[in-house]
Image (cartoon, coloured by chain):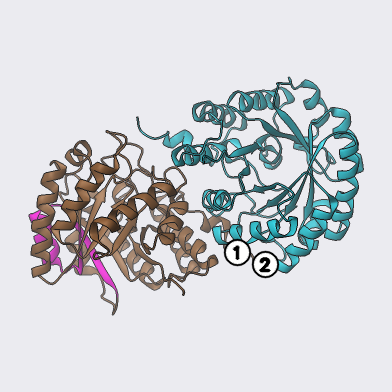
Chain colours: A cyan, B brown
Amino acid sequence: MTVMVDIVEVSPRDGLQNEATLLTTADKVELIERAVRAGARRVEVSSFVNPSRVPQMADADELMAALPRHDGVRYAGLVMNRRGLDRALTAGVDEINVVVVATDTFCGRNQGMTTAQACDTAAVLVQAAREAGVFTTVTVGASFGCPFEGEVPPNRLREVLTRVRDAGPDELALADTIGVAVPSDVTERLTLAREITQSRTPLRLHLHDTRHTGVANAVAAVQAGVTTLDASIGGTGGCPFAPAATGNVATEDLVYLFDRMGLPTGLDLEELTSTVSWLERRLGKQLPGALLRAGGFPA
Amino acid sequence: MTVMVDIVEVSPRDGLQNEATLLTTADKVELIERAVRAGARRVEVSSFVNPSRVPQMADADELMAALPRHDGVRYAGLVMNRRGLDRALTAGVDEINVVVVATDTFCGRNQGMTTAQACDTAAVLVQAAREAGVFTTVTVGASFGCPFEGEVPPNRLREVLTRVRDAGPDELALADTIGVAVPSDVTERLTLAREITQSRTPLRLHLHDTRHTGVANAVAAVQAGVTTLDASIGGTGGCPFAPAATGNVATEDLVYLFDRMGLPTGLDLEELTSTVSWLERRLGKQLPGALLRAGGFPA
């Protein structure tokens, strides 16, 4: 049986939110159009959050208005509160992604509330979005470790995942926000999540390659049957509210990996690396993804 | 059962041979002393090859003479012919590593002979080294792909591994010289090697992180029962005779990985990252390993 790996392109959101250089709305449209041309079918296009906190995402509404629509392509917006949800729904997103951080310290810094409060908020947002006919994801940030509290014990994650499950999202994502996970953690925590959801809620994994374990963790996820993975063109990204949080796992690195493993992603490596090259010029810096410089398998 | 992962430190050899900056012999001694202080027990210290071809390794004999000896620490030298072996034995290495490249094109560029000729040479060198009481490894370069010929079919690798097995080394290494392997390749080809050696010859894997699959491949190797892995402090390295061959998988990246997976390596992450910092100053460049900048798991 051939497994299909579904990569959710998060470069316009998690990728750009940590960059010093702000892209114009037109450049963001171009990035997203290029991602779609490369085969992306789900794109997290922006965050509907306070622009004074994340200025890189201030144009979320204009961006959605400017984006061409394509059959079979879904645009998602990250939201953290009712105001963000209302903006996202008005802007016409196909999906919302609600964040809950697994530790109180980090949740406080990220969104000004405790984890329990964030879970309650998520429940309200999920229900409101569902009534509006929008697909809902809840992402549990720092599922594998916290920059402030260190270890996130499995029992703590169990509690948070249980509350998140009870919020009733269409999809539940675990995020390794600071890139500390190793494959055995991925196996353990995805198994825990599956146990809690009793396999009724599809799972998704959000990885960072901060400690070069991102690709290995993606393999562990697929081996554990979780085939929806976030990634970012060029490996851009990071979290503005977590120290030393560097890039997401690079989309093109995962595409090389899964192509060679015989697992289709529907994404085109050459389109992706040409987009990395374009994005490096726009951001004025080299991005961490390997494939632009390494090239694919030698012909 | 806790598996121990044995990392062979190859930075002084494979690491430095592709660097534009030549380290002094004293600096190489310091690098090796630092590796040993970090816990390395096997160090590939140099290549006994033609200095006009690899000037970075021209001081192999002086380096061996200058190196302090430590109980339980073995120094290896790479050799490709009788002249190199004689130099290595005179210099007092504990191990030799003989290279055979799996494709004729690359083998010709690397060492001026066909793969078959390199296998014959390896057999002679292994026997002579054994008579001198020296541990022998044969490394099959380009076991996962060739920069010139592309795919290396399993049947080709089977032929080469069979000839190498017949040469009778104490250890057989597969090298992903240009960093193209993915975990499924590692599983497949280590299984093939084990079948050919009938588990009588210990296996070892040499990885490059050119396409960010190095850490994932290390995990696949350990899952397949191969726990002797080459790595290079800082992720230095590459092959002077292969285009776009970049660094070895970084020792410190593997140590973070295996520490967090509960698999002891006997290596100390802080000693390693302080060595990466020192080596970056010596080479005047940033090295690709992640852990120096990312830091370990947050306390």
Q: Is residue B248 visible?
A: no
- Whether B113 is drawn above or below B232: the answer is above
Question: What range of the chain is rendered magenta?
Answer: B73-97
Label 2 sits on a secondary structure element that is loop
Which residue is under mark 1? B297
- In the rendered image, residues at marks 2 and 1 fall on the same chain: no
Which residue is under mark 2? A151
Label 1 sits on a secondary structure element that is loop
Residue furthest bottom as drawn: B71
Residue B275 % position (x, y): 43, 63
Q: Mark 2, residues whose alpha carbon is within 10 Å: few (<14), some, or many (≥20)?
A: some
Left or right position of B4 against A104: left
Amino acid type indicated by mark 2: Glu
Residue A125 in the magenta stretch? The answer is: no
Q: Which mark is residue A41?
A: none
- Whether A53 is drawn above or below B261: the answer is above
Q: Within the image, what quadrant is residue A194 found in?
A: bottom right
Residue A162 % position (x, y): 79, 59
Left or right position of A31 against B12: right
Amino acid type indicated by mark 1: Phe
Q: Chain of mark 1?
A: B
Q: Chain of mark 2?
A: A
Residue at the location (39% across, 55% down)?
A: B282
Number of numbered callouts drawn = 2
Where's the C terminus of chain A, which quadrant?
Answer: top left
Q: Nearer the viewer, mark 2 or mark 1?
A: 2
Assess whether mark 1 and mark 2 are in contact (beta carbons under 8 angstroms).
yes
